[in-house]
Amino acid sequence: MLSLAFECAGRGLSAALAEDGQLIGTTQLDMDRGQPAALLPALHALLTAHRRNPSALERIGCTLGPGGFTGIRLGIAAGLGLARATGAVFHGFNAFDVYTLGDVDRRGLCIALESRRAELFIRAYDTDGVSVLLNDEVLTPEDTQRRINVARVLGSAAEKLSPTATNAEPDMAVLASFLSKASKNDALLTQSQNQATPLYLRAPEIGGGAKP
């Protein structure tokens, strides 16, 4: 099953192509702005480089946030448009869920995502790896440290909670591989199908108050 996954709600944009559980190729562009102009050409180039026709895509996935407002909206619009044009099924994922795909050990894990503000987007698991201590909240690093014992951290803002951590965006290679092999009855696949509601976690900032 040919599947495409991409992310543009964080820093830059990344994409991956996989088929039947095997990764075919990836692309990564490190950029602070300009994603609207770069996204579709990057996806086209990825498919062309690996001699795959867009009409062969069966599943298309992207992250719904949390992250940058413009990137979230861009990803959803592009994903829905590509799905409609190719006949593929669209899947929208909470970015936190992408970090826990595969064999990630969730025991005592904290995921910290960049918000470009003083606060971070946070999810944290208990030491049993199942119970959620902080459920997709918006917290400063200091408030996070006060509420939980941060032993292990992943995410695009990981370094703000642990000096030994390395910042990392959601891995589209993992997401594309999951999409290309997941059974139609898989819980996460079912949950994400046709899901296009943005996950902002905070209200958009649209400027100051009205002038008198």
Image: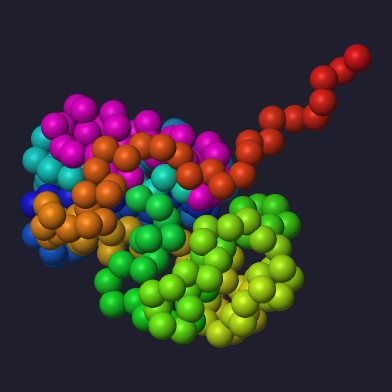
Task: Count the labels in the image.
Answer: 0
Looking at the image, residue 69 sits to the left or right of residue 141; the answer is left
Q: Horizontal placement of 202 versus 64: left or right?
A: right
Residue 60, picture quadrant: top left
x 16%, y 37%: residue: 88
Residue 58 falls inside the magenta stretch: no
Horizontal arrangement in the rendering, residue 175 relative to residue 74 (left or right): left
Residue 90: within the magenta? yes
Residue at image point 47% right, 74% down: 125
Q: Position of residue 99 (x, y in %)?
A: 39, 66
- The percent position of residue 116, horizontal first and vertical second, equals 65, 52
The stretch of residues the image draws in magenta is: 66-92
Residue 31 visible? The answer is no
Toward the top, the furthest residue is 212
Which SS does the magenta portion mostly show?
helix
- Rendering quarter of residue 121: bottom right
Question: Where is 119 relative to 155, above or below?
Answer: above
Taking the spot 27% from the left edge, 49% from the top edge, the residue there is: 191
Observer-nearest residue: 179 or 183?
183
Q: Is residue 64 above or below residue 170?
A: above
| Residue 3 position in % (x across, y down) | 18, 50
Q: Is residue 41 left or right of residue 189?
A: right
Query: At which x and y percent is residue 75?
Result: 40, 39
The C terminus: image quadrant:
top right
Residue found farthest to the front: 131
Who is closer to the viewer here, 52 or 105? 105
- Would you say residue 94 is visible in this rendering? yes
Q: How is the image coloured?
A: rainbow
Q: Is residue 208 above or below residue 144?
A: above
